[in-house]
Amino acid sequence: MKILGLVVSILLFVVNVQANANKDVQDSIVKIYTVSKIPNYAIPWNSSIRRSHGSGSIILGNRILTNAHVVANETFIEVKRHGQIKRYQAEVEFISHQSDLALLRVKDESFFDNTIPLEFAQLPQIQQKISVYGFPLGGNSLSVSTGIVSRLEHHTYAHSRENFLSIQIDAAVNPGNSGGPAISNGKITGVVMQQITKSQNIGYIVPCVVVKHFLEDVKDGLYDGFANLGIGTQKMESKTLRDVYGMNKDVSGVMVMKVSTLSSAYEVLESGDILLSIDGHRIYNDGTVEFMPQQYTSFMYYADKKQIGDSIEFELLRDFKRVEVEVRLQNVANDDLLVDTIEHDVMPRYTIYGGYVFTPLSRNLLSKKGSNRLELSEAASKWATVEKDEEVVLLKVLADNTNRGNHNITYWLIKTVNDTEFKNFEEFKKLVANSKKKYLLLKNKDGVKIAIDNDKAKGIEKQILKRYSINTNSNQK
């Protein structure tokens, strides 16, 4: 009987410890209310107001950790803790649209009274149990769903369209869960990010290693971002192609195809180099590395772990000889791309001249239905250069008698203004504004021309803006 009593006591002790641990987690879960100004890239002078909600968790330093997409384009944020009614005003302290993470500060720090900040775990194992905490589908009561870790690998983050390590889970994830923590053994394994629609319980979380990178980055009070190598690579799974480059069965890697001239890897890596290892980790022919025992993901995993300003080492095969090089990581993706990644927290830039609406080519615009034209998609795949770091399109024509014949032109990529090429949207606007000729002549890459009468364009400016209820003819960067 004494032994039975001891067993019962132990079980009760374990239950109480677990209950207290669960209560500590629950008390650190936050519901986030966001009012956002949503830009319209197809009609760049228009925007709409959206009210939404998400989830978050309290971490060290009286901060709330959540997704960037929960608070993107925000105009007003309120938060409330689980089990409480009062809402507190909050503000974004740091945001990483790349990794879909954000840190919030609450103006009234009494919000954090009697809370215990959640700590971070290490990368989980496959089939490790995980619990997702949050406020899905508009509910006011805390929801907890459980599941397991199904997969760890690089995946496209919907918010930025960039690729980083992610954790796939089978716990139920729904709108409103975003930003909430995925908990294992009482610690944050990751931040709930997105789900695959029309699937059965396939959700993704931002893993703790990516979160820790973000937190380390902002320690100095500035957000620098996740480094980009600025290279394009080809897998070397073809034995014949490996033979061409002198790679026997014991040698594996990926081939460098292109290097951005603006990249810090330029003149360090060369087209035709075979990258064999990154920071001492073997790169396999499919472009993966083993980052955990029997777990493989993109070799960029080891570059993603670095902070801006760090260096990374490569062993490579060049002209059949092994070479070791070092690349200092200085750029993020937007520094190397001709068309930047998805924009957030800004309004679209545009200018109107003679009813012609001009705007920089953006991935936000490309994501609009009907704008996925081949030449625009091709431009979005190119690297920026010193001479050209932004494309400009004629978005649409606001109909007027002075621009008849061109009313149906949309998404028209511009190469020159009066036969002069331009570096970016700012240079384009200057060429238009400073034109002294009678006609402004625009030309695309195929030589097709559009002519604008400068005097008529300037004469109808106020009339065009009034007719189409536009407050201003431009939006500065």
Image (cartoon, rainbow, N blue to C red):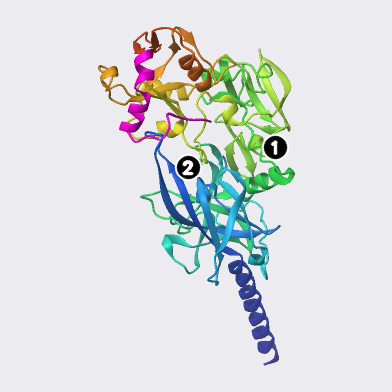
The total number of labels drawn is: 2
Q: On the picture, is 115 further left or further right than 168?
A: right
**Coordinates of residue 71 in the picture (x, y in percent):** 52, 50
* Mark 1 surroundings: few (<14), some (14-19) or many (≥20) residues within 10 A: some
Q: Is residue 235 visible?
A: no
Corner quadrant of residue 407: top left
Magenta-span inclusion, residue 105: no
Please report whichever mark, 2 or 1, sits nearer to the chain's N-terminal start: 2
Identified by mark 2, the residue type is: Ala
Q: CA distance from mark 2 to mark 1?
A: 22 Å
Q: Nearer the viewer, residue 59 or 269?
A: 59
Q: Nearer the viewer, residue 64 or 50?
A: 50
Q: Residue at x 58, y 30 (%)?
A: 333
- Disc 2 target residue: 158
Q: Which residues are magenta?
A: 455-477
Q: Is residue 342 above or below residue 108?
A: above
**Coordinates of residue 311 in the picture (x, y in percent):** 73, 30
- Disc 1 target residue: 307
Corner quadrant of residue 10: bottom right
**Coordinates of residue 113 in the picture (x, y in percent):** 67, 69
